[in-house]
Image (tube, helix red, strand yellow):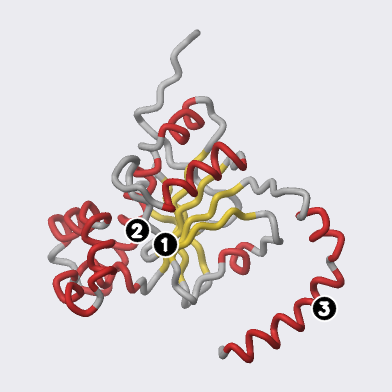
Amino acid sequence: MSVTGLIQGLNAFHSDYFTTNRALFERLSNGQTPEVLFITCSDSRIDPCLITQSQPGELFVMRNVGNIIPSYGAASSAEAAGVEYAVAGVGVRDIIVCGHSHCGAMKGLLQIGTLSEQMPLVYDWLKRHGEATRRLVLDNYAHVEPERLLKIAIEQNVLTQIENLETYPVVRSKLHSGQLNLHAWMYEIETGKVFAYDAGLRQFTLLRQRSFPVPDPLITTIPA
């Protein structure tokens, strides 16, 4: 869509949707209270609010190349600040990391050597924060055919980000007290289906009625 098309959309939004839902936006002007932090890729084919049918104010959304959250202390980043603000400031009760099929970032991660000259900034981002996923996939699944290998990389990358989230002090604290849940999702563009990681089955399964919070084996409840 061109900028002209975007402006036409803005005009339609204001004259139709905004006018019809003016009370909602007036209420939102007084503050936000989303219950979910939704972390996903910058890919233009993914719209978190569309696929979840969420209204304005219901999702706190973070997006970047490859839906990557660096581990705590790995870098002074907008991602770290966003996680901390969502949990400690906004008070979300669930964090969803949602990867997607045909992810260009994961394709690049599996062939990272070709990126260094063409897209040096993308190369640096993936090399610094995607190495754990790359190493796991190539060391354990090198025999798998390329299409299946990409799917494995996408899923393992989501699980890596869940592990990285658990290194954040504010996340650890909320997990310990039962005030926060982490969810690993994968959106399939061509079917519109979403799959959630089921730790009991150790695989991503079709998401129907409920999600499966990823349990943290390091969290233990200590009696007072």
How far, Cα to Cα, is label 1 from label 2? 7 Å
Q: CB atoms at circles 2 and 3 under 8 Å apart?
A: no
Q: Quadrant of the N terminus?
A: bottom right
What residue did someone put label 1 on?
99
Q: CA distance from mark 1 to mark 3?
A: 32 Å
Q: Is residue 138 above or below residue 192?
A: above
Q: Is residue 208 left or right of residue 170?
A: right
Q: Amino acid at mark 2?
A: Glu
**Residue at screen point 35% across, 47% down:** 76
Q: Is residue 168 left or right of residue 44?
A: left
Q: Could you tell which of marks 1 and 3 lies nearer the N-terminus?
A: 3
Q: Which marked residue is nearer to the observer: mark 1 or mark 3?
A: 3
Front position in the image: 31 or 200: 31
Q: Amino acid at mark 3?
A: Asp
As drawn, the label of residue 69 is: none
Decide: marks 1, 2 in contact (CB < 8 A)? yes
Q: Secondary structure at mark 2?
A: helix
Residue 86 in the figure: left or right of residue 217: right
* Residue 35 in view in this figure: yes
Q: Residue furthest top?
A: 224
Q: Which residue is mark 2?
A: 155
Disc 1 marks which amino acid?
Answer: Gly
